[in-house]
Amino acid sequence: MADVIWEEAEQVITCLHDGIGDVNNESGGELCNQEEMNRRTNWLVETLMTEFGWLKKASKSGVSMKPTLIDNCLWVTFSEGTISKSLRIPLPEVTDNNIQIIRNGDVVRVTSDFWLEREQIRLNYHETIKVILCDDIELIKPSMTSGSPLIRKIVRSFSTGYTSYMVSSTQRLINEMLNNLPLHESDMTSWAMNHRLMIVDEVFEKLRDPADRLEYQVDKNTRYYRDFGWTIYLLWTFVSILHLGCSIIPKGIYTPHLVCMVTSCLEFALNPCKSCWRKECLERVGTWLPLF
């Protein structure tokens, strides 16, 4: 009986995982190995050098910029005369279990892509760093208006005497973005976090009434399901847990709960706007998750 239930669970998960995979491809997501991660790092360095080249040419500044890779960190050093200041940017790596992590000293965190609601753009970690340095920081941090790219402000700061302040302020913003990423606790939860989105939504952040926030999120989920077939990637967490749960939980153990869980997720995938999802399916999730 247990083998039959397990087989049913695997079939449901396969269907659900294939469906989400199609959505991921359509929305710009991609599988990433260490080779792809290195390609992204090379792209980031080239982009920074190109942006700096334009700034140096336009400002006729004597400032130099040197990017250096040391222990999976990108050090970007700005120098002029006797003044030299550096930004430290920890870079993601892919583990043997295909988990994307970032080591920042003794702290290990998990990467998640960003979704810019206003611009309808998805950014990976390297693209987010590029936005912070070369674009308007307001895209990532709506409460802050920079007026011009931070890399431009750093170059200008050499002529105004505020170089230490500008570099440390920029480093603080990078660290803040890093500290908002989830901690790496287990491969199962980290795999799920790799496939979620951190949403930057200025409109939602300005709402204070809980009822208004709930109504806004429901309307947004309904619109996204209609336009894209997905709802802000909330389903990714469930799919991730289920996918790894099949390989971690021994066959024959907790399988009835697993079937209930995947059935609930499948119901949600087919109709996420259905009102019964909030009550019935979340009750099933609540009884299943403690089994981990």
Image (spheres, rainbow, N blue to C red):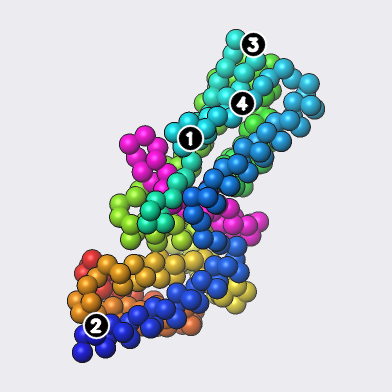
Left or right relative to 279: residue 20 = right
Local packing at callout 2 (Cα closer than 10 Å; few below 14, some 14-19, many 20+) is some
Q: Which residues are magenta?
A: 100-125
Q: Residue at x 48, y 41 (%)?
A: 91
Closest to the camera, between mark 3 and mark 1, is 1
In the image, residue 31 sits, relative to residue 137, either above or below, namely: below
| Mark closest to the chain's N terminus, 2 or 3 | 3
Question: Sequence-wise, which precedes: disc 1 or disc 4?
Answer: 4
Residue 234 figure quarter: bottom left
Give the residue at mark 1: 73
Vertical placement of residue 265 versus 183, above or below:
below
Residue at the image point whose x is 27% and y is 67% from the top: 248
Tell me the kind of residue under disc 3. Gly
Find numbered disc 1 in the image and state the secondary structure of the residue it sits on. Answer: strand
Q: Which residue is mark 2?
A: 256
Q: How many marks?
A: 4
Q: Quadrant of the N terminus?
A: bottom left
Q: Nearer the viewer, residue 9 or 37?
A: 37
Task: Give the alpha-carbon distance from disc 3 to disc 4, as whole Å.
Answer: 14 Å
Please say if 146 is above or below 139. Answer: above
CA gap, disc 4 and disc 2: 58 Å
Mark 2: which secondary structure?
helix
Q: Residue furthest top?
A: 82
Q: Which residue is mark 4?
A: 66
The residue depicted at 24 percent of the width and 70 percent of the height is 249
- Given contact means CB atoms under 8 Å apart, are the residues at marks 3 and 4 in contact? no
Q: Spatial distance from mark 3 to mark 1, Cα to Cα?
A: 25 Å
Quick one: label 4 or label 2, which is nearer the N terminus?
A: 4
